[in-house]
Image (tube, rainbow, N blue to C red):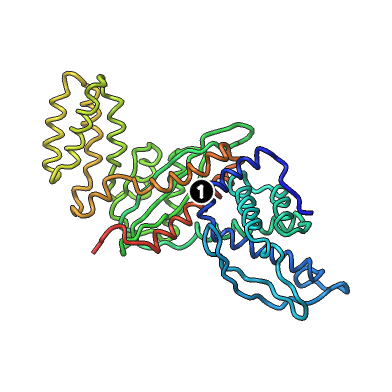
Amino acid sequence: MAMQVNNSKISEAMELIAEKGFSGMTEAMQILFNEAMLIERSRYLGVNPYERSSERQDYANGFKPKQVKTKVGELSLSIPQVRSSEFYPSFLEKGVRSERALKLALAEMYVKGVSTRKVETILQELCGLSVSSTEVSRAAKLLDEELSQWKARRLEKYRYVYVDARYEKVREAGCVIDSAVLIAYGVNDEGKREILGVSVSLSEAEIHWRNFFESLVQRGLHGVELIVSDAHAGLKAARQAVFPSVPWQRCQFHLQQNAQAYITKRSRKREVAETIRAIFDAENKAEAERLLKIAIEKYAKDMPQLTQWMEENIPEGLTIFHFSVEHRRRLRTSNIAERVNQEIRRRTRVARIFPNVESCERLVSAIAMEISEDWIAGKIYLNVN
């Protein structure tokens, strides 16, 4: 009889993922399906691959391709064949049950971190077999290899690069800390957007941003004409060190949010926001600078801290005036990261606290990989011709 998952809290979390749809894991599902079928064939034959034994029941005979439609996408599977007897992976005949069990297995790997014991239980339910720790570890390794290949792929010329950071709770040395998730996005010469890389670090210190930027350059990133980001101190210093000659556009959306902290009267928040928006919406840089000067004079007496902040920070949001009008709307903010952050939030709220940095980076990378491939296959983000 197939074993069931007993941990009620894990079951509750996994049920939530199942209800919301564990989308974005199509390639990972293919890897785990194919690995599970190999395990089952080995058990059917009575030997491991390349093993000699008098107890062998038959011989492996290649693979047969099969497309399987699931709720999370179409899977391209390789069905293991045997030479002179009938064999068909049992879990493919279990339909929805196997798909559900597989989603739970993937959820364990990506949300809670790879746990050999827990994944072994799920694979027993999936295959109806006793699966060794070595076999489970191999399946998990294949998943990580797929993500590692994506993160190490060669990059090309990207005219515009956006960088963003968010925080996730991770256990480290017995403590729960907020780890920085660093993500870089790019727009290539075809106008297609793409996620260039992901890194999870213990903080947003300059050294982490610098290592991240340097890794992108080492992978081939070149031809960058503009970097768009918020004003994280570590990011700013690392950008200046690695990309000293590349212009920088500070995210206008974040500038608008930052300005609110310097407005002393709540009744004037909307007024100040509209004033700043008028600066950003100016026809050209000269007009934007003229409107900024007027705003500084207007608020100098009532809100001196605001005027000082505007004088020092608003100019960092005006770099886009050196670029074409057609491109400004896409370059004025780092909102390209919005969908990715939404997906990350939707998944990580189930985990709440990651057991380690690796499990956090695994989940974020899987989400980023799937979204990036959708972008590449989708419509043009920016007309660069």
| Residue 299, percent from left and from top | 17, 24
Q: Is residue 373 above or below residue 321?
A: below
| Residue 204, percent from left and from top | 45, 38
Q: Quadrant of residue 351?
A: top right
Q: Is residue 317 above or below residue 242?
A: above
Image quarter (top left, top right, bottom left or bottom right) of the C terminus: bottom left
Residue type, mark 1 in image = Val
Residue pointed to by mark 1:
364
Image-based side of 71 in relation to 160, left or right: right
Image-based side of 232 in relation to 137, left or right: left
| Residue farthest along the right direction in this orientation | 54
Identity of the residue drawn at 55% across and 46% down: 19
| Residue 276, percent from left and from top | 20, 34
Depth order, front residue of 233/54: 54
Depth order, front residue of 237/255: 255
| Residue farthest along the bottom direction in this orientation | 84
The crowd level at tag 1 (other Cα within 10 Å; few <14, some 14-19, many 20+) is: many
Identity of the residue drawn at 73% across and 42% down: 6
| Residue 4, percent from left and from top | 73, 48
Image-based side of 150 in relation to 12, left or right: left
Secondary structure of residue under mark 1: helix
Disc tally is 1
Identity of the residue drawn at 29% across and 42% down: 250
